[in-house]
Image (cartoon, rainbow, N blue to C red):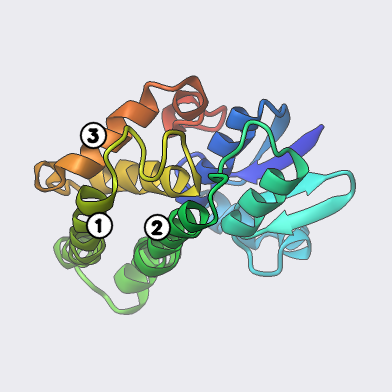
Amino acid sequence: MMQLHSYFRSSASYRVRIALNWKGQPYATVPVHLLNDGGQQHAPAFAALNPEQLVPVLSDGGQVFTQSLAILEYLEERFPQPPLLPHDIVLRAQARSIALAIACDVHPLNNLRVLRYLKRSLQVSDEDRDRWYRHWIAIGFDALESRLTSVASGAFCIGDGPTFADLCLVPQVFNARRFAVDMTRYPRIAEIDRHCLGIDAFAAAAPERQPDAA
């Protein structure tokens, strides 16, 4: 059975949990608490597994995979059905583009280690830290809302089924709500998020349903 080193509130881990659920692949969760014990991702045993000291880490048949988007690609190739990328080459590129916009342009500016650096090393106040978070979410979501409104007409970001784009969108919306981002500004994003959370694979991957949820 595959093992997923995961933290329940990690957006990147959340993406992989959805993919594993959608593919119907059983896995064992290995919790890595990013706050307890000074951050369990910094423990020597985990650092040996992933020198980047980040989650998720997927172990499958003795192979170790890091970086959530690379893991999604691996799972799509290893377990092609049911798919998480459209058959059409143009739609596949569009799905990857949205996924990368979220995973590379929005999420890295707002992940835990950046927020902790702002707070601990730069002595940024809680209020300014949250303003930082909402600022970068707004830039990313403004562009994404416009894009989704103009190109998407179905229930998902791209095409008639969930793709990498939706797997990245839903965790980012979860975190946006945690930081009190006004989602009424983004009706199309909120609509897609709501639809996806009605699907078992997404609902079962939600942070509050994980074995390490605080």
**Quarter occupied by the C terminus:** top left
Q: Amino acid at mark 3?
A: Glu
State left or right for residue 136 relative to residue 77: left
Cα–Cα span, label 2 and label 1 = 9 Å
Q: Is residue 4 above or below residue 39?
A: above
Q: Quadrant of residue 157 in the image?
A: top left
Name which residue lies at 37% across and 47% down. 169
**Quarter occupied by the N terminus:** top right
- Quick one: 37 or 6, which is closer to the camera? 6
- Quick one: 159 or 174, which is closer to the camera? 159
Q: Read off the residue under disc 1.
A: 147
| SS for dot 3 | helix
Q: Tell me which label, 1 or 3, sits earlier in the chain.
A: 1
Q: Read off the residue under disc 3.
A: 191
Picture coordinates of residue 78 (x, y %)? 77, 44
In this view of the protein, can residue 41 be seen by the observer? yes
| SS for dot 1 | helix
State left or right for residue 86 relative to residue 180: right
| SS for dot 2 | helix
Picture coordinates of residue 180 (x, y %)? 17, 46
- Mark 3, Cα crowd under 10 Å, few <14 / some 14-19 / many 20+, is few
Whether residues under marks 2 and 1 lie with C-beta atoms below 8 angstroms apart, the answer is yes
- Mark 2, Cα crowd under 10 Å, few <14 / some 14-19 / many 20+, is many
Q: Which mark is residue 98?
A: 2
Q: Which mark is residue 69?
A: none
Cα–Cα span, label 2 and label 3 = 16 Å
